[in-house]
Amino acid sequence: MNTIKLILTIILLHSVNLIYSQPLVIRGHVSDKQRNNLFAVNVFLLKQNTIGSVSDMDGNFALKITDPKTILGEHLVFSFIGYETFKIAFDSINYMVPLNIVMTENMQALNGVVVEGRKSISREFSIKEMDKLKIYFSPLASADPLKAVAMLPSSTNTSETANPELRGSSANRTKVFLNGVPVSNPVRNSQINGIGFFSLFNPELIKSMFVYPSNPPLIYGNTSAGMIDIETEDKLESNNYQISASLATAGISASQKISEKSFIQLYGNLMFSKGFLSVNPEINKQLKSFNSNDIGLNYHRVITDALTLNIYNYLVSESSDVLLNLFTWNDNAKAKTIRDFSVMNLKYQKSKNNISFNAGTNFSSSDFRFGNISSEVNQRQIYLSLNYKYLFSEKLYFQTGLSNEYGKFDFKDQVPVFYYAMSPASPSFQSDSLLKNNLPETYAYIRWKPVNSIIWGVGLRKNIDLFHTKNPDYLSWQTNLRYNFMNSHSLLFSVGKYSNITEPNFSYEEFRMLSANHFALEYLFETKKTNINLAAYYKSETGDTTGNRKIKGFEVYLEHTITRTLKASISNTILNSDIGSNEKLYNSENNVGYFLVTTLSYFNPKVINASVAWSTRQGRFFTPVSSAVYNPGIDFYQPVYSESINSERIRNYNTINLSLNKTLTVHKSSLIVFLSIFNVLDTKNPKSMIYSKDYSAGSFDYYQKRSVYFGCVLSI
Amino acid sequence: MKTTFIFLVCSVFLVNSCKGNISFSDNGIIESIESETALLKRSYQNDTLLINFQEKVMNAFVNAKISKSDKGLVDLEKALLNLNKDNNNGIIVYWYSYTCYYHSILLMTEKENKSSEKILDEGIIQLKNVSNLNSEHLALLALMESFSIQYASGIETPFISKRVKENAEKALQLDSLNLRAYFVLGSNDFYTPEKYGGGKKAASYLTKAIRLNDQSIANPYMPTWGKNSAYELLIRLYIRQKQFTEAKKYYQEAISLFPDDYMINKLSKDLIN
C-alpha cells in the first residue's frame, strides 16, 4: 500500500512539475476558407513574439513553449501575408485537441481584388489593350489613338481616315466609348475625304484603350460591330507640360496636380491648312482649306477613399472647303461644325461593391453646302447609365445596369429633286425634319474564372419600353470563353447577337435598327520577342439600306523583335464579304482577297527612331454606269447602273509610309522632332469613279498622294 | 522488486521530463514525447529545403563564382521543381524564381547573356503563373522585370519600366510595409533617365525601404532581402547628387548594419574621393 502511495505521490508531483515547469507543445492546423493548407504561417505569442513557430507545407504546426508560465495572460497569434491576423487567448485553448485555425484574406488582399475589380469586367476578352505608351510607340499612328487602332490587323478601313472600321463592318456599326459613354463621330473634320484622319482624343489623357474588333461586350450597348473602350487617367504621376507645332497644328497640353487627390489636364490645338497645303501643293488639288480649333479639359478628383469624380469636356469648331465631285457635278463643298462633348463619371467603391454613374452630352450644329444642297443639323444627344458591379471573389464578378441614349436631330435641308442633278440651278426642295429617340436598355454580365487558365463571360442586353418609343424589340446576348495555356498561348471563342440603332444623317433621316450575329475564334501567342495572332470569324449583318451582309474573314499577324533596335511585323486579312438579299448575294465593295500591312521599326533613341509601313490590298468593288438618259428639263444625265452589282474592281491600293523622330534633351526638357512622309512613292491609288457629264467617259478620284508632315513637341 | 519498479517509473518520467515535451492527442490521451518529437521532425524534414532558402541561394551563388560552376544553383532549382510537383505552392515558386534571378546574374557576370536572359525569363514566367500573387511575389516580379530591361530591345524598355512600377505599387497596396517593394520602386526611379521623369522619387522610396523591417515576424521561409541594396543605392544617389553629408550619414548607418556587404564597402572609395 505504501508503495502504491509512494508511486502515486511521485506521479502527482511529476504532473504538477509538468504543468508548471515542463515545456508544452501546442499543435494544430491552419487553412484558408477554401480549406487550402496554409504554409509558412507565423504562429507566435503576442507579447513575447520571439517565441514562435511556422506551419509546414500541410498546414500543420507545433509550437513548443519551454516555460509554460510564459503563457499566462498571453495570446497565440497566427499571421500570414495576405491574411487577417488571428488571435486566440491561451485561456480559451483546449490543449486536449489540436487547434484548427481558418484564416480569412485581409482587407489589403481584398483590396487587390477590388483594384482588379475596378477594371473593365470584360477586358480579358479584348484582343488588344493599348496604353498611352503603346499609342505613342505604334508605328505611323502619329500619337493618335484611333490611328493606332487603324494599324491593327482587324482594321479593314479603306478610307484613309481614323474612323474605325473593324472586320469588314461599316463605321456606323462600330462605337467608341470614353469612360463608358459613347462618342458619336470620334473624328475631326470627318466631312472631308482623306482629311478626317485625326481623332478627338489626346493620348496624354488616356490610361488604357481596349479594342474589341468583333463581339463587343454587352456592358456597353448600341453597337453591332466592333468597339473601342477608352479610359482616361485616374492618377497623375507628375506634372507635365507640352507645346507642339507642326505644318498643320499648334497646340498646348498641360497636366497639373491640384492636390494629392485631384489633377487637371488641359489641351488645345489650332489646326490650319496653309502650311500643309503650301508644302504639299500636289497632295490633293481638290482640297482648298481646312481649319479646326479645339480645347479639351479633364478633371479628376478623389472625393473620398470610396468616391471618385471625373469630368471631361471637349469643344471643337471646324470648317473645310473642298472641291467635291458628286455624280457629274464638281463644286466647292463647304462645311462648318461647332460641337461640345462632355463626359461625367462618378464612381463609388466600397469593399466588393462598385457603383458607377456615367453621363454624357453631345451638342453640335453643322452646316454643309454643295451645289443645290444645303444641310443644317442641330444635334443633341444625352447618355446616362447606372452600373453596379459586385465582386463575389477574384474568380467571379457580376455587373448589371441601366442606360438610356437620347437623341434629337433637327434637320433643315435643301435636297435635290433629282439625285443626279446638283448644280445650284438644279431644282431642289426644302426637307425639314425633327427626329427624336430614346433608347433605354438594361444588361447583365457575368465573368467567371473557374480555374486559372479559363475565363468565361456571359452577357445579355435588352431594350426596355420605358418611354414608349417605336424601337423594335430586341435582345442581344453573347458568350466568350478564353483559355490560356502553356504560359504564352491563348484561345478565345466568342459568339453573340448584337443590335444597334443608327443615328440619322443627311442621306438617311431615320433611326434605323441594325443587328448582327458574330462568331469568332482567335489564337494569341505572346512571348517577349514574338507575337502571333490568328483570327477566323463569321458575321451576318442585317438592317443596312444596301442589304444584308455576310462576312467571312481570316486574319494573321506576326510581330517579331529581330534585334535590340529592330522590330518587324506583317499582317494579312482575307475578307470575303457579300451583300444583298437572301435570294442573291453580290460582292461587297470592301471584299478583298488580301489586305497586307508590313512594318519595320528601328528604335535607337541615341540615333533616331524610324518606322516604315507598306500597305497593299485589292481595290474596292463598284457598280459601273452602263448608260445614261438625258433629262432636257434640267440639262443633266441620269446614270443607268449595270445590273451586275459591284462587278468591277478598282485598281489595287499600294502605299508606303515613313515616319522618323528624334528626341533631344534641352536642359531637363525633351524635344521630340518628327517627320512623316505619307505615300513615299507618290502612288496614284484610285478611290472612286468620276464621270463626264454624259457618263460616256470616266476617270478616277485618287487617295492622298505623297505628303510631307513635320513638327516638334517640347515636353517640360 | 518494489524498488526496481519505483526506479523504473521514476526513470520513465525523468527521461520524458528531460526530453521536455508533452502533448495531447485528439482523444485527450497523453501521447509519448517520442511521437511529438517525430511530428516536429517530420515538419522540418518536408520543408528543410525551404528554411532560410535565401541564404542557400546566396551561398550557392558565391560558391558558383568561386568554382566557376553553376551546379549549386541548378541543383537548388531542380530540388524546388521536384518539391513543387507534389505541393504546387506559391512559396516554392517564389524561391524557384529567386534562384533563377541569381542564376541569371551569375550568367550575366560570366558574359553568357543569352543563357542569363533565358533563365531570367523562366523565373518571370513561373512567378506570373502563381495564382493570387501576394506582395512578396509582386516585389520579386518587379525586381526581375527591372533586371530584364538590359536584355530588352529599346522599344520595349519603357513598357517594362512601366510594368516594374505597376507591380511594385501593387505589392505596396497589398502590404504597405514591404521594404522590397519600396526598394524596387526606388531602384526603378534611380535608373530611369531624368528626361523620362526619373530620379525624382528614388530618395523617398529608398529611405522608406531602409526604415522598414526585413520581416514583421521572423519567418525562416520568407524573404529578407532588400535593405542592404536599398542602403547602397541611396548612398550612390546622394553621391550622384553631390550631397556628400547625406551620403556619409547613410554609409555609416549601412556599414554598421552590414559590415561585410561588398557593395556597401566599395562605396567608401567614392566617398573618400
Image (spheres, coloured by chain):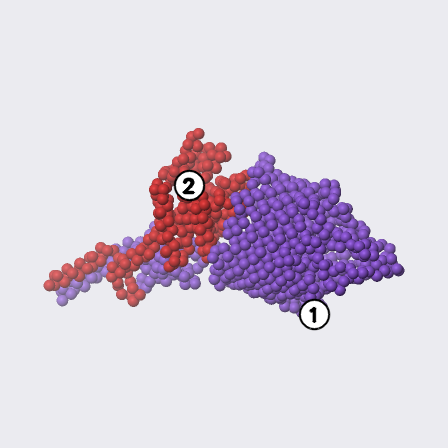
Going by the picture, which residue comes out furthest to the left?
B1
**Residue appearing at x 77%, y 56% in the figure:** A377
Q: Nearer the viewer, residue A1 or B87?
A: B87
As measured in the structure, the alpha-carbon distance from the residue carrying label 2 to the one carrying label 1 is 72 Å
Q: Quadrant of the N terminus of chain A?
A: bottom left
Callout 2: few (<14), some (14-19), or many (20+) C-alpha neighbours within 10 Å? few
Determine whether label 2 and label 1 are within 8 Å by CB: no
Q: In which quadrant will I find the C terminus of chain A?
A: top right
- Numbered disc in front, either 2 or 1: 1
Query: Please, which chain is the residue tagged with disc 1 on?
Result: A
Taking the spot 72% from the left edge, 41% from the top edge, the residue there is A279
Q: Is residue A685 left or right of residue A240?
A: right
Which quarter of the picture shows residue A157? Answer: bottom right
Question: SS at mark 2?
Answer: helix
Element at label 1: loop
Q: Which residue is mark 2?
A: B109
Locate residue A663, reporting x and y percent.
59, 39
State the residue position of label 1.
Answer: A583
Q: Which chain is red?
A: B
Q: Amino acid at mark 2?
A: Thr
Please state the horizontal and vertical placement of residue B130, each as a whole percent of the image: 45, 56
Q: Which chain is purple?
A: A
Give the amino acid at mark 1.
Answer: Glu
Q: Residue at x 58, y 51 (%)?
A: A570
- Classify mark 1: residues with Cα within 10 Å, few (<14), some (14-19) or many (20+): few
